[in-house]
Image (cartoon, rainbow, N blue to C red):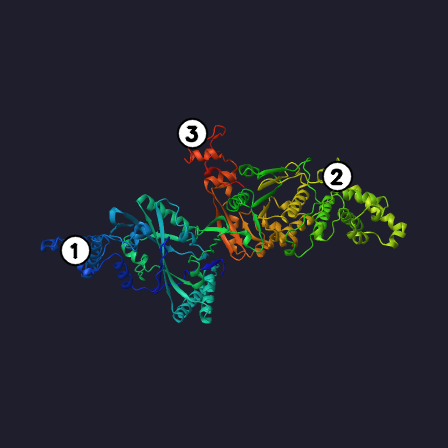
Amino acid sequence: MGEFVETYGALPSLVLLVSVFMILGSTPIFLNASPGAIRRRIADTVGRSEGVSGTRASASDGTAEGVRDAENEFVSEAVRRLQRRGEDVSGEALRDELEEIEYERSMDQRATTGAVPDADDRSESTRLSVAPNRIVESKSYIKRLGGNRNEKLARVLIISDYPSRVANGWLDTLFTTGLSTKGAEVRVSQQIWPRDSQTMKQKLNVRATRLSTKLQEKREKGKVNTLEEEKKLEHINRLRDELTAGSAKLFDFGLYFEVVAQDEDALDEGTQELKQHLAQSNARLATLFDRQRQSQRAIAPLADDPIRKTQVMDQRALATAFPFTDPTVVEPSGVLLGFHSATNSPVVVDRFQRSGHNMLITGKIGSGKSYLAKLAMWRRLMIDPDAEVLIIDPVGGFGDIVDAVDGQKVTINSSTIINPLEIKAADNLEATDSNPYDEKIRSVMGMFESHFEGRRELNKEEEGVLRRAIRLAYLRYGITKDPETHGNESPTLDDVLDVLRNLADGLSPEEFIDPPPESESVLASLSASRDQRRSAESQKRIAEYAQSVLLGLEDFQQGGQRANLNGETNVRLNERVVQFDLSNVADGRNEGLLMHIVLDWLFQRAKNNDGNMIVVIDEAHYMLGHDQSLDMLNLFVRHSRHYGSGLTLISQTVDEFMHSEKAKEIYDQCDIRALMRHQDLSEEACEALGFTERERNFVLQAQAGNSASYSESLLYVTGIGKLRMRVLSNDFEHHVVDGDLDAWRFLVDNEIVDPDDVPAHESTGPPPRGPRSERGQLD
């Protein structure tokens, strides 16, 4: 189905045969129901046992004089109504009007109204719509009267001018969220009647002949303004071919809107909002003047349409008017990510139930991506007492929420040491399909390659010597491919530098490495062959390569710019929430390298993790520009599920994950993807994401969190699909996420505790910076 569908505005309409009636909130649907059946059903519900003919006596005082007075009153009212509508006061019209009045007055005598006797189970508005006690008609609306002086005003509108093309879901908002006008509601009634295909082909043939003749006349007169006729003829020919092939069917479609409100002001305001909403789809609305009572039969579930304002549509155009909504996701062990944009149903997803535990959040600055990440983090901590959240934060943007939850801040600076060679034994080694030792060697090599990037490129011989030095450094502590050795003390960069110095001095590994007896075979494999040892020239080349690499690693030596990476780790994680703040060392060149090292260290920690662990990486694009960092990310996203861990990647655009195969692999491993508002989406990204034009437009026009009290996202969940979501939080959550929480002040302001009960050493502080609607959800 295309994004925009022709509605065949040039074709005439016929008689309706099927009706669909929908009321927001309860949405009952009646198909092919006879008027008598519906009327009997309503009558049975409200307790009406006698027929309409018995109502006249019930309206009187029981005397002959009372009966005559009632009859005169009925006749006078019927004549007034007919005259007000400009209709002839004929016998048949008067009789029909009297029946209507009799029915209304009979309902006045009944104490119970509505389809559900208990008013608490259904809104009074809906009860009045289904079975009011009385209806009073005005020129442009009706007044429905119920028990206990309840009343509602209602106005029916029609589409006087249909758009030539409509987008999918052009009525979704009306079917779900309705109107924003306070005190106003909207109901939508659809009347759908199939047309006979054979008859329609004959009519299309006639229409095509007339258009062809008109086109020919214009061309003979030299006129060039034939585009409209050509388009209409093209549509008709296509439709005629589809009818002949049996691939299309035509329907008469009647669409009626009823605005319901408490008073005239709300009614007029709701009407105006409805007109403006439909105008966005180029549909023009008009009020039915002096036909409001008659239009009630088109709104009610009676399979009747006395208005007969219809439009011819095929099944594709017709489908655009149905409320086909996105799936609802509520997983009992999940986290509330937001609310469905169309249905307002909660979106509750458990990342740890997916085959991959990873989440990707992308969006422009101010879109609300960091807000969503923080909100999901907070809610996970609330429902999972064993969960840990570790944040790699290159710009320090998560500091406020870490303070709010009394978390731990690890500021990466010259005094913070994280050993990039640290390796941990895995508790669940059977679940992985690769050797942790080889992965660690690749990670350390990737760190060194990132260090050399932009300075000079290591040749293959230098890479070989450096890799051998790393392996020898591990071997010095008895660490090999055997997982049983991974619990040994880990080497540091000093050990790698020392190995390189010995190699540069022309020594062979046997001369400076003394491994445990069980590792002697490994030492032999890392040593040069006998032929090479006998070759002085070969030994000299190895020494030269080692010296060259050693000179390039001066930054890691004591006093160097990266000396804080050389030594045993002095970071101890003591809280459930830990922020690694890299903002002090971020200089445009260090971010990727440091994020790589911290992520690798956390990956080692994840191997011994008992509960669920989430690693949040803000500004992930710093790592996407380096092959070595991409390898580390890929390693984590592929194996995190084996250790009860998951990554949350935050970046500014999804296009960043389309520039390389490695980045695409990382994207594919994220089973939850939230696209906040984007500045642009490339065709390549849309194709990879499987986006329709409508979905692309939603992402480009989504509400940004920095200009409202909520933000919007197109959410993809593996096994569920795509759905549109609003990110919302309550006041307490907002203060936590926004970092301005004063817990005692919140408790006092919400009258949860008395001000006198606040401890003396606690301060309720100044009020927050402003109402939430002013602050919005800052990224």
Question: Can you give x and y, in whole percent of width and height, for residue 701 in the image?
Answer: 51, 48
User: What amino acid is labelled 3 in the image?
Assistant: Asp
User: What amino acid is labelled 1 in the image?
Assistant: Ser
Give the crowd class for mark 3: few <14, some 14-19, many >=20 residues within 10 Å: few
Q: Is residue 456 left or right of residue 274?
A: right
In the image, what residue occupies the spot 19% across and 55% down? 78
Q: For marks 2 and 1, give the one nearer the viewer.
A: 2
In the image, what residue occupies the spot 88% across and 55% down? 531
Residue beneath disc 2: 555
Give the crowd class for mark 1: few <14, some 14-19, many >=20 residues within 10 Å: some
Q: Earlier in the sequence, mark 1 or mark 3?
A: 1
Question: Can you give x and y, in whole percent of width and height, for residue 226 in the image?
Answer: 47, 60
What element does badge 2 sit on?
Answer: helix
User: What amino acid is labelled 2 in the image?
Assistant: Asp
* Residue 650 in view: no
Residue beneath disc 1: 58
Give the crowd class for mark 2: few <14, some 14-19, many >=20 residues within 10 Å: some
What element does badge 1 sit on?
Answer: helix
Distance Cα–Cα, label 2 vs label 1: 101 Å
Residue beneath disc 3: 756
In front of the other: 417 or 597: 417
Distance Cα–Cα, label 1 vs label 3: 65 Å
Question: Can you give x and y, in whole percent of width and height, for residue 95 in the image?
Answer: 19, 60
Distance Cα–Cα, label 3 vs label 2: 58 Å
